[in-house]
Image (cartoon, rainbow, N blue to C red):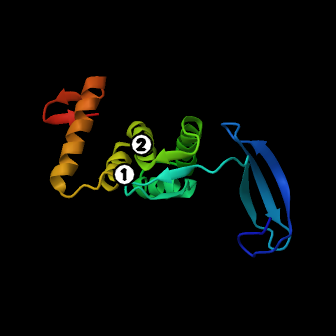
Amino acid sequence: MRCPYCKADNDRVIDSRASADGFAIRRRRVCADCQRRYTTYERTESTPLRVIKKTGERQEFDRNKILSGLRRACEKRPVSTEQIEAIADRVERQCIEAFDKEVPSKVIGDLVMKELQHLDQVAYVRFASVYREFKDATQFLEELRRMVERKRGEGGFHEEKGGVSG
């Protein structure tokens, strides 16, 4: 394995364990040249899943795109890297289990939104605004209204003196 810091091909594994979901092996490595540590993940190779974009274009499923969208949505929010990785893992696993060869991008976006809705409401609205391509503040406010109504229905918000509290 090539070191991501100094690019040397001289490392050793110092710890190896199964990931929480059991579908990957996490390996901690140390570079013999620069002494820096890094983590790699080993996953089984399978038939590549393809994503059907809104335009009808097809491209290879890329877990990093999910991670990138999650990181942007969760920026400056109290969401850990481990939580973001876990969401990406669950979304990827659900897509692989439910679809043999091709998955619509809408399914991926809906799965991410469902995860964010339960994790962090601000991250959820950020992701929704990009994913659903909000054109103006009205669409943004409509999504917030729906979210508040869902929370009220679940007993998550309670009316108090000047408004809503969580």
Against 157, residue 42 (above or below) is below
| Image quarter in which the C terminus is found | top left
Of the two numbered discs 1 and 2 on the same chain, state the one appearing first in sequence. 2
Comparing 5 with 25, the one in front is: 25
Give above or below for 156 relative to 49: above
Q: Residue at x 40, y 42 (%)?
A: 110
From the viewer's perspective, tell me whether residue 57 is left or right of residue 2. left
Q: Is residue 134 left or right of residue 4?
A: left
Q: Residue at x 25, y 55 (%)?
A: 134
The residue closer to the viewer here, 60 or 143, is 60
Disc 1 to disc 2, C-alpha distance: 8 Å
Amino acid on which the number 2 mark rests in the picture:
Leu
Residue 2, quarter of picture: bottom right
User: Who is closer to the viewer here, 47 or 146?
Assistant: 47
Measured as percent of width and height from the top left, residue 161 is found at 13, 31
Give the SS element for disc 2: helix
Q: Residue furthest left?
A: 162
Side of 84 where 24 appears, left or right: right
Marks 1 & 2, CB-CB < 8 Å contact: yes
- Residue 76 in sight: no
Residue identified by numbered label 1 = 127
In the image, what residue occupies the spot 29% across and 56% down?
133
In the rendered image, which residue does mark 2 sit on? 116
In the rendered structure, the answer to whether residue 96 lies left or right of residue 129 reads right
Relative image position of residue 10 (x, y in whole percent): 86, 69
Secondary element at tag 1: helix
x, y percent for residue 1: 80, 64
Q: What amino acid is labelled 1 in the image?
A: Phe
Badge 2 crowding class, 10 Å Cα cut-off, few under 14, some 14 to 19, many 20 or more, is many
Question: Can residue 25 be seen at all in this image of the molecule?
Answer: yes
Q: Residue 70, labelled with which disc?
A: none
Q: Decide: is 126 above or below 91.
A: below
